[in-house]
Image (cartoon, rainbow, N blue to C red):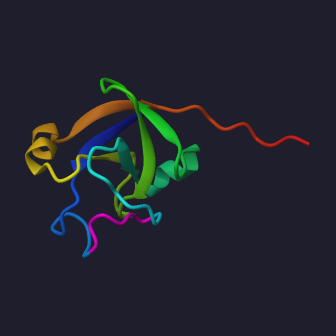
Amino acid sequence: MEVTATAYNSVKEQTSNDPFFTAFGDTLKPGTKVIAISRDLLDSGIHHNMEVTIEGLEGKYKVVDLMNSRWTKKIDIYMGTDISKAKEWGQQKVIISWVPEKENSK
């Protein structure tokens, strides 16, 4: 799926009064590969703690945060406290992929 990708940091100016605490209740740790997703992506089968691949970036990124409801088809890549790295990333179109979970069958 093609989405717009931006970057964010654990700083009060970009998040809330507790910039290391996510909407899902996780604690952010600089150096981890995690993302926030726009809420509409929940309808696509992506969910909390799911791992996604971002084309052009190594490894897998875990979904640990939700973005404001005003965003659609968007992810925010966590870049710790390195604001210059986030600004350098800017805004890009990327392809994300994930493995859908199988429905429990009885």
The number of callouts visible is 0
Q: State the residue at coordinates (23%, 35%).
A: 92
Q: Is residue 32 above or below residue 39?
A: above
Q: State the residue at coordinates (30%, 64%).
A: 20
Instruction: Work out whether residue 50 or residue 74 is closer to the camera in this orientation and state it.
Output: 50
- In the image, 103: left or right of 14? right
Q: Is residue 21 above or below residue 40?
A: below
Q: Position of residue 77 (x, y in %)?
A: 30, 45
- Quarter of the picture containing the N terminus is top left
Q: State the residue at coordinates (91%, 42%).
A: 106
Instruction: Work out whether residue 2 or residue 57 is closer to the camera in this orientation and state it.
Output: 57
Image quadrant assignment for residue 2? top left
- In the image, 74: left or right of 12? right
Q: Position of residue 11 (x, y in %)?
A: 18, 63
Prevailing secondary structure of the magenta residues = loop
**Residue farthest along the bottom direction in this orientation:** 17
Q: Position of residue 96 (x, y in %)?
A: 42, 32
| Magenta stretch encompasses residue 81 | no
- In the image, 88: left or right of 95? left
Q: Position of residue 28 (x, y in %)?
A: 34, 57
**Residue farthest along the right direction in this orientation:** 106
Q: Is residue 61 visible?
A: yes
Q: Is residue 74 above or below residue 55?
A: below
Q: Is residue 1 visible?
A: no
- Magenta stretch bounds: 18-23
Instruction: Work out whether residue 75 or residue 80 is closer to the camera in this orientation and state it.
Output: 80
